[in-house]
Image (spheres, rainbow, N blue to C red):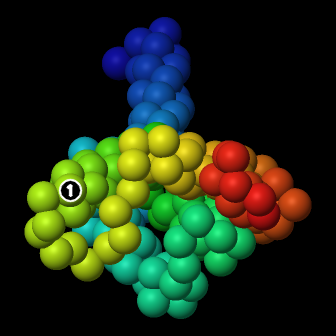
């Protein structure tokens, strides 16, 4: 092998190594399974675990405790599974919860007993808006590498006093 071929080979090896490091960083290939972008089941499982842990530690709805749970849970989820997946999980969760409240509201109108107080659409949307706002506070905290700032949390749905 000539010296020129050896130099080209060394340059090619260096480029491959540099690009491999860049790809590994972009796709979190060196992190545990939940951070791997393709491992959706692990991400969904971890998001659900974070949600359940938060509900046990900080029970409450549409109040300061609920706000704190959403902010801290979103921060933890963003750090563990990535902000995009955490945000998607939060939105899907609010849609599912809103649908369940809608079913409860409809059932209460025909006398079907439900476990929760019936809520009208305005209450459902105001509660979801509050939760999504507090999730964003948590995502920002994760991105900036700091704890959730309690002053940024919305502690009551819009239209209700704090």
The quadrant holding residue 46 is bottom left
Query: What residue is at 87 percent from the left and 61 percent from the top?
Result: 151
- Given the current orientation, which residue lies at the most extreme bottom position? 57
Query: What residue is at 70 percent from the left and 55 percent from the top?
Result: 160
Residues 120 and 141: in front is 120
Residue 147 appears in the rendering: yes
The quadrant holding residue 114 is bottom left
54 relative to 162 in the view: left or right:
left
Which x, y percent locates residue 15?
A: 49, 24
Query: What residue is at 34 percent from the left and 50 percent from the top?
Result: 98
Which x, y percent locates residue 135?
A: 59, 53
Query: What residue is at 65 percent from the left and 70 percent from the top?
Result: 63
Residue identified by numbered label 1: 109
Q: Using the image, determine if residue 80 lies above or below residue 11.
A: below
- Badge 1 element: helix
Q: Using the image, determine if residue 146 lies above or below residue 140.
A: below
The quadrant holding residue 111 is bottom left
């Amino acid at each position: 092998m000539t010296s020129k071929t050896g130099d080209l080979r060394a340059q090619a090896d260096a480029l491959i190594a540099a690009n491999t490091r860049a790809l590994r960083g972009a796709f979190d290939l060196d992190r545990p399974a939940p951070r791997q972008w393709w491992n959706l089941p692990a991400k969904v499982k971890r998001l659900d675990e974070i949600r359940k842990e938060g509900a046990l530690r900080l029970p409450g709805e549409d109040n300061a405790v609920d706000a704190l749970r959403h902010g801290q849970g979103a921060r933890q989820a963003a750090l563990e599974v990535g902000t995009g997946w955490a945000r998607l999980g939060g939105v899907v969760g609010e849609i599912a919860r809103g649908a369940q409240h809608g079913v409860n509201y409809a059932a209460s109108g025909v006398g079907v007993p439900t476990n929760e107080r019936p809520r009208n659409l305005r209450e459902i949307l105001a509660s979801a808006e509050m939760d999504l706002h507090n999730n964003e506070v948590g995502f920002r905290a994760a991105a900036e590498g700091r704890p959730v700032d309690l002053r940024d949390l919305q502690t009551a749905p819009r239209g209700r006093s704090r």
